[in-house]
């Protein structure tokens, strides 16, 4: 069978300071830069990327694969009109040129908003559907953080979502998507879809599938899927609660060979998620409290502190200084922080050279209220070109390019300084500048949860800190305008309508 495929991934934080332009997709933001045609195979080959898993599974079945475009950009504010239109045009043109086709696969995120379209993926799918017509199967894969919309569900034949956060099953999700498509090729009866919208937002920091309640909910999802031969696929996206539009939030959906089976499965999973509502919560510590607790831990394995609100994987700029100040003020030793992304500071460190002392105004340049640059004399311990391979469970062997980088030292604190954004989710992102993470007493990572996949095995404790940053873990701290009035702002919280009324009273 002839299968055309494309990838267009962006997680949009509409409250973030900087948009995603075309150049951001060329850079990739920790993922392969924009690739076109057969070059896609080399760009994604072997990586933990849905399209890579799909390609592997499709080739095993002997299908002909016709690559068009694959691209991703670091999470940020909305995708610019120029970037969205250029990339969509390339995808549609590639699919048109590949006709005739037996199917199309799209590797999407599910939480992309463009300057002209709140539901970016819905618009991409609409254009692809218009190109291929109603009868060519269109299958899609999504991030667990997708804000899944009615347009996505209505216009695609199959939607399959990740089941892990940290996302270690991205390539596996691509393989599962191909498995459903293969069943369609083999004569599976037409699929019926049923879906339910969860009535509350789930802060990303409490979505971890290694912990309850998410762990148990996804186990139940898989049990439901195994227990009914009519049920072909079941998904639960917990949503990305930083996108100010009416369909932001969690969704469950089911594909089955009968409408009754689809509805029963969707209802069962919906009921389970709603019953677990109050279990989606935990402790967020201020910077000083997080550092003090880490300092009180016994010697041995590191204590990891997550700088949850400056995660470049969710739209942060990876440059806030709150936790750096807390480490220095506490006189912490054997402590390391990464990534601090500041191209000007990295350039100055390279100009000074390894072993030099250089005065820097470090970070604090993204305009976050309550955050300022950290000014000090830093020792440049080492320099790097920023190129290395990350082999942890999340990045899965991806070749990183963080641009000119350095290890800075201030007292007992070392800082990984980089020029390009990427979420610190791999131990290699310390090692590439000469820091051995297993030997540190405290590790501060600019990540919300993805770091757990590689750091939990070496950590004696993991703490979550809420320091001023662009990704508020408390949704009530963001200036929402367009949420569904009926959705609860957090588990057990007020509806958006009630919250908005309380703020204007």
Image (cartoon, helix red, strand yellow):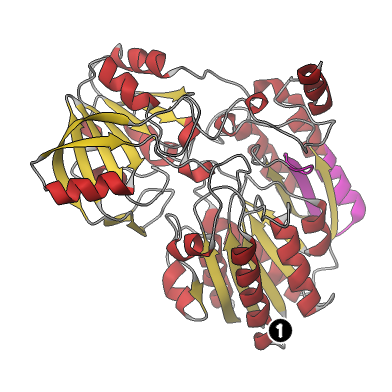
- 262 in the magenta segment: yes
Q: Is residue 207 positioned above or below 431 on the image?
A: above
Outermost residue, right direction? 260
Q: Which residue is mark 1?
A: 101
x then y, percent, for residue 138: 74, 70
Dot 1: element: loop
Which residue is nearer to you in this view: 429 or 357? 357
Name the quadrant of the N terminus.
bottom right
Give left or right: position of 31 versus 100: left
Q: Residue at x 54, y 60 (%)?
A: 21
x then y, percent, for residue 188: 80, 69
Asked whether residue 435 appears in the rendered view, the answer is no
- 407 in the magenta segment: no
Residue range highlighted in magenta:
245-267
Asked whether residue 142 appears in the rendered view, the answer is yes
Q: Is residue 282 positioned above or below 7 on the image?
A: above
Q: Residue at x 43, y 40 (%)?
A: 453
Which residue is nearer to you in this view: 347 or 2? 347
Outermost residue, left direction? 355
Name the quadrant of the C terminus.
top right
Give left or right: position of 393 versus 470: left
The total number of labels drawn is: 1
Q: Residue at x 21, y 47 (%)?
A: 348
Give left or right: position of 207 versus 160: left
x then y, percent, for residue 167: 52, 46
Q: Residues within 10 Å of mark 1 (few under 14, many from 20)?
A: some
Which residue is nearer to you in this view: 496 or 49? 496
Quadrant of residue 471 within the rendered picture: top right
């Amino acid at each position: 069978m002839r299968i055309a495929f494309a990838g267009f991934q962006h997680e949009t934080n509409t409250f973030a300071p900087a948009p995603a332009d075309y150049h951001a997709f060329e850079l990739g933001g920790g993922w392969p830069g924009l690739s076109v045609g057969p070059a896609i195979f080399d760009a994604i080959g072997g990586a933990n990327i849905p399209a890579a898993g799909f390609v592997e599974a499709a080739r095993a079945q002997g299908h002909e694969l016709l690559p068009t475009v694959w691209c991703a950009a670091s999470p940020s504010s909305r995708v610019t009109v120029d970037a969205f239109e250029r990339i969509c045009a390339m995808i549609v043109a590639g699919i048109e040129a590949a006709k005739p086709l037996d199917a199309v696969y799209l590797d999407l995120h599910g939480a992309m908003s463009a300057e002209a379209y709140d539901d970016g993926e819905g618009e991409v799918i609409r254009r692809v559907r218009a190109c291929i017509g109603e009868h060519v199967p269109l299958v899609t894969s999504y991030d667990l953080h997708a804000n899944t919309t009615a347009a996505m569900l209505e216009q695609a034949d199959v939607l399959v979502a990740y089941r892990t956060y940290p996302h270690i099953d991205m390539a596996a999700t691509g393989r599962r998507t191909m498995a459903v498509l293969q069943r369609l090729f083999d004569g599976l009866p037409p699929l019926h879809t049923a879906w339910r919208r969860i009535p509350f937002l789930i802060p990303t920091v409490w979505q971890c599938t290694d912990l309850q309640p998410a762990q148990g909910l996804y186990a139940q999802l898989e049990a439901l899927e195994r227990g009914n031969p009519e049920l072909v696929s079941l998904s639960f996206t917990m949503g990305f609660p930083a996108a100010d539009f009416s369909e932001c939030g969690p969704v469950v959906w089911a594909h089955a060979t009968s409408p009754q089976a689809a509805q029963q499965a969707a209802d069962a999973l919906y009921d389970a998620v709603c019953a677990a509502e109050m279990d989606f919560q935990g402790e967020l510590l201020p910077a000083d409290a997080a550092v003090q607790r880490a300092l009180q831990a016994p010697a041995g394995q590191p204590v990891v502190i997550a700088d949850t609100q400056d995660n470049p994987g969710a739209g942060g700029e990876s440059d806030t200084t709150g936790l750096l100040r807390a480490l220095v003020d506490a006189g912490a030793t054997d402590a390391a922080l990464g990534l601090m992304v500041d191209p000007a500071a990295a350039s100055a460190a390279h100009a000074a050279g390894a072993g030099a002392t250089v005065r820097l105004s470090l970070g604090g340049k993204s305009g976050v209220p309550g955050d300022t640059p950290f000014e000090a004399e830093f020792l440049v311990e080492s320099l790097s070109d920023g190129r290395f391979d990350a082999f942890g469970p999340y990045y899965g062997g991806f070749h990183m390019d963080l641009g000119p980088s350095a290890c800075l030292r201030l007292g007992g604190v070392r800082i990984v300084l980089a020029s390009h954004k990427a979420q610190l989710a791999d131990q290699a992102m310390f090692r590439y500048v000469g820091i051995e993470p297993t030997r540190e007493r405290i590790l501060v990572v600019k990540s919300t949860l993805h770091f757990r996949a590689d750091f939990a095995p070496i950590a004696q404790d993991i703490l979550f800190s809420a320091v001023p940053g662009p990704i508020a873990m408390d949704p009530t701290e963001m200036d929402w305008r367009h949420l569904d009035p009926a959705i609860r702002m957090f588990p057990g919280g007020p509806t958006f309508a009630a919250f908005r009324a309380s703020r204007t009273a």
